[in-house]
Image (cartoon, rainbow, N blue to C red):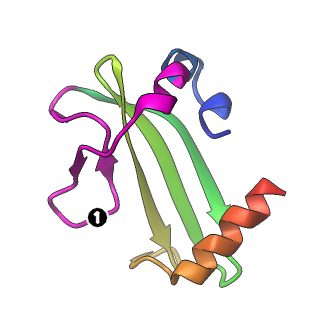
Amino acid sequence: MLMESGRPEAYRFIPQIEDVRVMVECACGCARIYFVSDPSADIMILASRIFDRPDGGSTHCYVFSVGEFLGGLDAFHYNKIGELEEYPEEAILRKLHLSECQ
């Protein structure tokens, strides 16, 4: 689990996972979603992972807190030469997810 491999501070947020609901999507159109209605408090990254993709790029994701609450998650992608890019096709993400679960 992503949270269990994160910072020591992440453990105290694990009990909140069962109750999270997406409250706000980032206004810029990125993939960040917030589990709190007011994301203006300080953000602390609790855990992060980098997944290598079959096309040579990488997918980065992280979970963060907002104040004392599990705040949300974000994901972004780099192509094989390190440039930030649009999200890959859903099929690529599904393959990555399944390979991580095995």
**Pointer 1: what residue?**
30
Q: Does the magenta stretch include residue 27?
A: yes
**Which residues make up the magenta segment?**
14-41
The image position of residue 29, as x and y in percent, is 22, 67
Q: Is residue 72 above or below residue 77?
A: above
Query: 70 and 8: which one is in front?
Result: 70
Of residues 3 and 54, the one drawn nearer to the viewer in this rendering:
3
Query: Which one is in front, 63 or 18?
Result: 18
With 27 as the anchor, is 86 left or right in this view? right
Quick one: label 1, few (<14), some, or many (20+) residues within 10 Å?
A: few
Residue type, numbered disc 1: Cys
Rendered image quadrant of residue 94: bottom right
Residue 17: within the magenta? yes
Instruction: For the N terminus, give its image quadrant.
Output: top right
Residue 80 seen in this snapshot: no
Q: Quadrant of residue 86?
A: bottom left
